[in-house]
Image: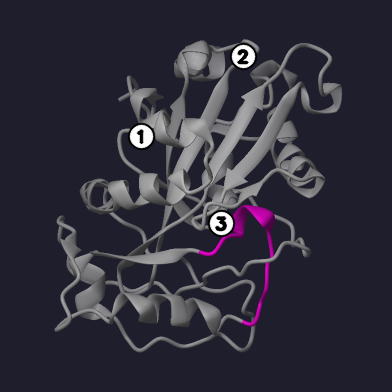
């Protein structure tokens, strides 16, 4: 079967996995007229930020997928188009793990949402004490705007690498990444009514040949919004099971969609 690896991050089916302590936020999609700005919290139009957390806690599913794990926390940011059209929140008692689709944002809406929440992301990841959490914004960014990634828990993500990993920008022509490459994806979550919250920072690092031959020498980690670092064996196995689909020719790297790639139009 032919696999479109460029689309895998945004269309892959992720198997259920139980055992990590955090819950997945599941939301319904709404349709409304397009607006392209993101605003700070407006009590007249948007529920209070703490209600964002309460809405997440009503999901009885539990951790369906470790890439969906993390105590997503609310910020003051929201997408007006969704906030103005939002119905009441409700749990899905029939299939809470399946949930409904995360709202899709236009390129401009996604960029505006990121601009609003970007400082909150850095503040959250900085709680970990991991040095790269305060450095990666100075690295090369490969996404022109955040894009929706099924493989990362239906979150909007941006892609970065350090200087060692600059060949990532060659995408499918990159070949094997150099030892010392660090690739990260910052993420934010989006509720059905347009509220924007902090998601995990996803990290993969390339090690010296022979370090982890079963994973092509990659290791995987997440920094959760509360600053907790997740890099246990379960994370290594789950992330590798997804990345290995890309195959040796792409060094287990799967690339963002063409329409979001820096340098590809």
Q: Which residues are magenta?
A: 60-71
Secondary structure predominantly adopted by residues drawn in magenta = loop
Mark 1 and mark 2: Cα distance apart in space: 23 Å
Residue drawn at x 53%, y 28% as measured from the top left: 183
Q: Is residue 68 magenta?
A: yes
Residue 92 visible somewhere in the drawing:
yes
The x, y position of residue 30, in whole percent, is: 33, 74
Q: Is residue 219 left or right of residue 190?
A: right
Q: Is residue 94 magenta?
A: no
Q: Which residue is mark 3?
A: 153
Q: Which residue is mark 2?
A: 177
Mark sitting earlier along the chain (1/3): 3
The x, y position of residue 167, in whole percent, is: 50, 12
Residue 18 drawn above or below residue 114: below
Secondary element at tag 2: loop
The label shown at residue 259 is 1
Residue drawn at x 58%, y 36% as measured from the top left: 203
Q: Are marks 2 and 3 in contact (CB under 8 Å)?
A: no
């Amino acid at each position: 079967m032919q696999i479109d690896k460029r689309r895998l991050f945004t269309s892959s089916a992720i198997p259920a996995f139980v055992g990590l302590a955090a819950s997945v936020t599941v939301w319904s999609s709404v349709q409304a007229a397009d607006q392209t700005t993101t605003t700070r919290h407006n009590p007249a139009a948007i529920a209070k930020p703490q209600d964002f957390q309460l809405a997440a806690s009503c999901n009885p599913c539990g951790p369906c997928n470790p890439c969906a794990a993390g105590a997503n926390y609310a910020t003051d940011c929201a997408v007006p188009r969704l906030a103005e059209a939002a119905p009441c929140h409700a749990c899905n008692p029939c299939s809470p793990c399946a949930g409904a689709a995360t709202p899709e944002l236009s390129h401009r809406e996604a960029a505006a949402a990121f601009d609003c929440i970007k400082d909150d992301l850095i503040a959250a990841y900085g709680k970990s004490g991991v040095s790269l959490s305060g450095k990666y914004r100075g690295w090369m960014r490969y996404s022109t705007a955040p894009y929706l990634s099924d493989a990362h828990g239906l979150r909007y993500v941006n892609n970065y690498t350090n200087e060692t990993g600059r060949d990532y920008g060659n995408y499918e022509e990159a070949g094997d990444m150099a030892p010392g490459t660090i690739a990260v994806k910052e993420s934010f979550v989006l509720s059905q009514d347009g509220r924007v919250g902090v998601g995990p920072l996803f990290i993969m690092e390339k090690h010296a040949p022979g370090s982890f031959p079963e994973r092509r020498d990659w290791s995987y980690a997440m920094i959760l919004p509360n600053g907790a670092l997740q890099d246990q064996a379960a994370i290594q196995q789950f992330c590798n099971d997804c990345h290995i689909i890309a195959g040796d020719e792409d060094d287990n790297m799967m690339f963002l969609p063409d329409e979001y790639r820096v340098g590809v139009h």
